[in-house]
Image (cartoon, helix red, strand yellow):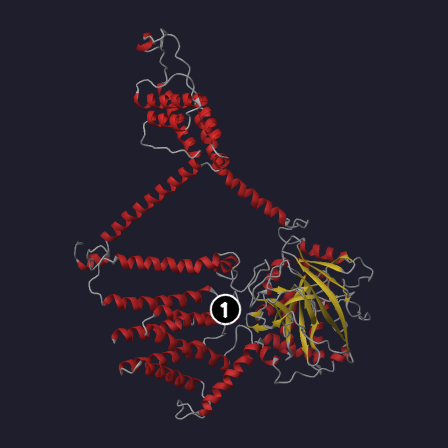
Amino acid sequence: MIAKRNLGLVAAAATLLAAAPLSAIFDRWTWLVQSTITVAVVAAVAALARLGRIPLWGQVLAMLGGLMLALTWLFPSGAELLGVVPTPSTVGHFGSLAEASLVDMRSYGVKVPDTDPMLFLAVLGVGGVAVLVDLVAVELRKPALAGLPMLAIYSVPVAVYVDSVPPAPFIIGAAGYLWLLVADNVGRVRRFGRRFTGDGRGVDVWAASPLSSAGRRLAAVGVVVAVVLPLAAPGMAGGLLDTIGSGTGEGTGGSGRATNGRVDLFSALTGQLNQNEVTDMVKVTTDESSPFYLRFGVADHLRTDGFRARAPSGSSASRELRPAEPDREGIERSRYRATVEVMESFEMPLLPVYAEPVRIQGLNGKWFYDTNQQVLFSNRERSSGKRYEFEYVRSTYSPSALRQARPLPTEHSLRRQMSTPTVPAVETLVDQLTQGRDTEYDKVRAIYDHFATENGFSYALSTEGGTSGQEIVDFLTNKVGFCQQYAAAMAWLVRAADIPARVAFGFTNGANVDGDTYVLTNRNLHAWTEVYFDGFGWVPFDTTPAYGVQGAARTAWAPDLEAEEDVTPEPNTTAGPAGSDPTTNPNQLEEGLEDELSGLPGDTGTPNRPLPLWSWWAAGALILLVLLAVPALRRSLLRRRRSGRRAPAAAPAGTATANADAASPDGRHMVVLADADRARADAHAAWHELLDTLVDFRLRIDRTETPRATVGRLTREAFREDTEAASAVQLLGRAEELARYARDPHSGEPLPPALRRVRAALAAGASRRTRLMAAALPPSVLLRWRTAVAETSARLVASYGRLQSVALRWSPRRLLTNRLPR
């Protein structure tokens, strides 16, 4: 009973640890407090039921009753008995919360606020998992199966927040699961009695059991492999390695890479604009003569630390996205068609489209469209390399029509998403700018006009790019920044005026390369403000000075602030520097931006194009060939070093040894070389080369054989019909035999020619595959490397054993027991 009680507490704690991934969904920790209360009630009821020896079905009913009581206390309907006893109206209230949670899931993006429907759903799920874990782990004694309901909790944030769940909650949940397994196994082992090593020997009190030590090592290795291997596997983005590489779990750095969910578009924009090199990102073809900006992202979640992008949610992009609305007074809608080709350098879970797309073709079912954010996104794929077509509607508005827009109703769903932190300096400025303005549009125009150059605002890329309340105040004070600060500042001020606004990201109009085809580079990346007018939708306003942006466009409702007052810009006209002639070369905008960037550190004045893709493939193939050639190169160098030895010349007259007068059988005198050590080393080198050659050509060698026995076997098996090769191998064997056992080594004919003759004979008798392997991947070199690795591993194991022996000798557990090991 005590064992079950302890295991029940561990099961409850493990359930709470397994719920850690839910922290990636909720904005606050209210869910954890309520989940802890619920799990504690379930665990307490289960312990009481086991104490009363209630049958299994009764324990399940008791835990479900405890879960119901906890939910009733945390989410009351007001009609409960004594505040905690549920009634039929309580059940109806729970049903209403469940239905409302579906609405909240469609309305909110990650991270969601603490709404009762979402909290009810989370607490109900965690409590239900607590019941299942207790039942499986404690009563059925199958703790391994308890991982299934615990894994169900982890699957929820993964499904909602794809590729963006940080690794820490998963590790915490895995630790809880391992804790449950260990607790169950400890309880089982304690019933066995005395510990043993596995070979019958007892284990001292101070020493750890070898079985438990092995189990801990296996568990540690398993956890490391389970966590690290999937993170390091190609194609699995958004994990720990990406987090370390980018320095943040949400952002993209400057590369444009980001996980789906909350893309740090500000970080991506800053990184791309500050690059010195110009990179082609998108090619777009449209039948619209003067298109507006191509957009791909939105940041509409405003917190004290700045704007953030919500996780988009929507339906398949393959269906018709929205019906085309008819024109009305003050609004002109035109329908166009565009084709977009995304380059490899633009890699995001988002695709660029013009605002208000109607139908998209060329994308698979993994791409979705969010009608609220007006973004095209995917949970599983990236944008690079995609090519697709779409129809879209271009809406233009007259200022007089926008002035007819009424304030947004209080019950409108956008009100809940457009909360704005209070910044006194911003509130004061907005009150001053909107004083006396009656319509929504006039308030927005007053804020828009405030960012004119005549008020001291200017464009620069060298400033910090933050969007928090303090940084917005600094920008409004210093009046120097680039597009993301202008867009975020206006959106913040418009929200402070109680009008919905957000920051949009995309591309300005690029260079026209072929009639209606435009190439958009990283210099065309841009951010602007979109304001919501009731009855009109999201209307764009670009406050960034036009001279700082390539391909900037201005509209009738948001004209160029630098133009002369008596000049009324036409809709969709491309803006230029103040006072510029409409016939001015459009390349002047690019030249102006190059001048702005020329002062940045590291600017060389000449944009560097990235290397083409084929060059990277060629470099990779070259590196692979070099690596494959290393064994052959190592064998060639070794053969050259061995054959490079030459027998020294005979000693000059008067330097002969005492054996100089000895006569040979044929009557000639034998002269002994002065350098016997050199001749002995040459013989050993030639013999080792012969053995390596035999290994290369797959012939058996026996290191225990004498040179004479090896030569005899080769003569019988390999050179029976080749007398020259047989003579050559006999010469090599005789030289090695004399070098090993005789006082005077071999001093006759040189050995390298004999080696070459033997190698040629072996190559002639071998198959084509054997010859190819002997030349490209010599088995002798690979064998030598494997032997070296094995010897190094053996030395490391021996060193670890000695270190472990020393550590055990001074183990605190041993010293405290004051006993000697048996």
633 or 815, nearer to the observer:
633
Dot 1 crowding, Cα within 10 Å, few <14, some 14–19, many 20+: some
Residue 605, image x, y percentages: 68, 49
67 or 274, nearer to the observer:
67
251 or 205, nearer to the observer:
205
Residue 316, image x, y percentages: 62, 71
Residue most toward the front? 721
Q: Which residue is mark 1?
A: 158
Q: Quadrant of residue 587?
A: bottom right
Direction from residue 729 to residue 507 in the image, left or right: right
Residue 391, image x, y percentages: 72, 69
520 or 427, nearer to the observer:
520
Q: Quadrant of residue 273?
A: bottom right
Q: Is residue 450 visible?
A: no
Q: Does 259 sit above or below residue 334?
A: above
Q: Secondary structure at mark 1?
A: helix
- Quadrant position of the N terminus in the picture: bottom left
Q: Does 689 sit above or below residue 417?
A: above
Q: What kind of residue is marked 1? A: Val
Direction from residue 12 to residue 303 in the image, left or right: right
Name the residue: 44% across, 72% down: 153
Residue 479, image x, y percentages: 65, 66
